[in-house]
Amino acid sequence: MGPNWVAFKTLFTSLDLDVVVPDPTNREAIKIGVKQSPEFVCFPFKATIGDFVNAIEKGADTLVMAIDCGPCRFGFYASVQERILKDMGYKNITLIPLDQADLLEFHWVKTLQEVSGRRDLFIYSKFVKAIIFFIKKAKLLNDIQTAEGIFRAYERNQGDTTTIVNNLLTKLDEANTLPILRNFKKVIKEDFNSLDIDKNRSPLKVGVSGEIHISLEPYVNLDIRRKLGEMQIEIHQSISLYDWVVHKFHLNYHRKWYGHLSRPYLPMDIGGEAQWVLGEYIDKAQAGFDGFVHEYPFLCMPEVTARTIITNKLKKIYDLPIIYFSFDEQSGMEGFRTRLEAFSDLMHARRNKEIQSNAKFVSNGNKKIYPHYGDVFYNECYQMIQS
Ligand code: SF4
């Protein structure tokens, strides 16, 4: 899932294992996944089959796949994928499931024992180190994502933000001591501070949310974050690997808040991110955002349910423009770009109308004043841009 290989790599190298990082998801991987998977299965299943085949061809003999108790098809991914890979002739691979239904049940310790092949007492100190490094790197990836979402909307030279992000990922991958990781937030800030920006811009603010695999993997979502940023749109995406892990440790308070907001419309977790997408839509509408992007895989039942609730209920209560993108192997760039441009025009027209009818905005030089929104790191980035 996008840059998150950096955190997963550190989890297993800390256990003295050789890690084979598959190539970034690509056309070839998707082709293999589509050919080998049942036609009706959801798209992330196909994409991960392709990634697994790539890793096996590069020398991996053990695969680790997250599993859950459902409630959607994700509960069956690992066992079906293992059978498909064995049917393809990869008889000697071992697929180890990583139970992430509730991380406080500590089933993941068993998985780490199984992957490391050790059960002696000494290995536990390595588990602790592996988990600390994994969580720290996941948090830093989250910070890079936050900074990228805001800075790209201000960059003068298209592509500079992407270069900074790629350099930071290399540096983070090479950072393998606690003091370096503790200092890494400073490195992120310094690198983004070197970006040539136009601070006089007033970008539109858009919330991006949806199914986790589609939201985090740029190849399958046609690099939507980058496209929006290059259209000078500021992105707020709370979903990340870190966000998910903290949620599974029951410590994610903004997810609890989204769950609270969505409860009248969807009182239970039906899989995917459906429940939190609804809450996030309401939250962003209340925060005065200009738009919302909901992305999900074609045939994803929970996200389609969320879409229906937004269309039939929430849109009638909250006036926040929304665009839906359903991705699969057939997704094409041109129609996608045209729809994004039309959405951007709509948001600009809406904001201009809002400014004209609001004396407070007119006195601010025809600029919309956005209420305070974002976490501590977001606000630090924002101050860097303002200064
Ligand atoms: S969340 Fe959607 S895409 Fe993911 S496994 Fe469930 S149904 Fe499939």
Image: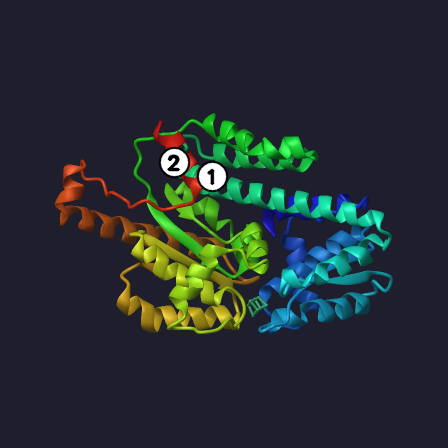
Mark 2, Cα crowd under 10 Å, few <14 / some 14-19 / many 20+, is some
Q: Is residue 288 left or right of residue 53?
A: left
Image coordinates for residue 146, horizontal then vertical, percent = 47, 43
Q: Toward which corner of the image does residue 111 lie, by quadrant?
A: bottom right
Q: Residue at x 82, y 61 (%)?
A: 94
Q: Return the mark for residue 320.
A: none
Which residue is at the front of the view, 327 or 235? 235
Q: Is residue 169 left or right of residue 302?
A: right
Colour scheme: rainbow
Query: Residue placed farthest to the front in the image?
Result: 121
Mark yes or no: residue 219 visible. Answer: no
SS at mark 1 in the image? helix
Which quarter of the rendering shows the C terminus?
A: top left
Q: Residue at x 21, y 47 (%)?
A: 352
Q: Which residue is mark 1?
A: 147
Mark yes or no: residue 48 visible. Answer: yes
Which residue is at the front of the view, 139 or 197? 139
Q: Toward which corner of the image does residue 117 lie, by quadrant?
A: bottom right
Ligand 1's quadrant:
bottom right
Q: Which residue is mark 2?
A: 382
